[in-house]
Image (cartoon, rainbow, N blue to C red):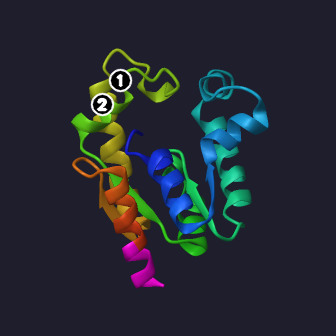
Amino acid sequence: MGAGKSTIGRQLATALGWEFEDSDQEIVRRTGVTIPVIFEIEGEDGFRRREARVLQDLAAAEHLVLATGGGAVLREENRTLLKERGFVVYLHAGLEQLLERTARDKNRPLLQTSDPRARMMTLLEQRDPLYRQTADLVVETDQRTVKGAVKEIIRQFRAAS
């Protein structure tokens, strides 16, 4: 959450001449409601089931840069799918940077708490090992421009291809 998946993903897709999809935006498009509404009605588990279905559909595409929701790695089936279907990049940012980037965003139901810092720390502790296990490449985004991150991803992707 807040590491730059959508921003960097869009520019990466443009640089590669590929399509770009954001799984969270696709869920919103398919349901016609915001993610906070899905969380309110179906809870996190209901949202994660929807997310897994969308990832199945999107991961079937070729020449696609896919930005997943931050919690997509929580399900083993998603991690396996992403690993099998693509080159997975984990955009990592430190706690302070993530809090700054998400501070005013009300579209993040997991951070709508009295202590967003503690919640973000818990999410990082839970997700970071899963991201690292799944990723082909880890890119630090704290002190890197979007353009710099895109260049690094393309360089590493081409070297791995």
Q: Farthest residue toward the top?
A: 114
Residue positioned 69% across, 40% down in the render: 27
Query: Residue 28's image quarter?
Result: top right
The verdict on residue 66 being magenta is no
Q: Position of residue 18 (x, y in %)?
A: 62, 64
Q: Is residue 111 left or right of residue 25?
A: left
Q: Which residues are magenta?
A: 155-161
Badge number at residue 103: 1
Q: Nearer the viewer, residue 33 or 21?
A: 21
Query: Residue 29's image quarter?
Result: top right
Residue positioned 33% across, 63% down in the render: 138
The verdict on residue 159 being magenta is yes
Residue positioned 68% across, 71% down in the render: 62
The residue that disc 2 covers is 99
Q: Position of residue 123 (x, y in %)?
A: 36, 40
Residue positioned 35% across, 63% down in the render: 132
Q: Position of residue 9 (x, y in %)?
A: 50, 54
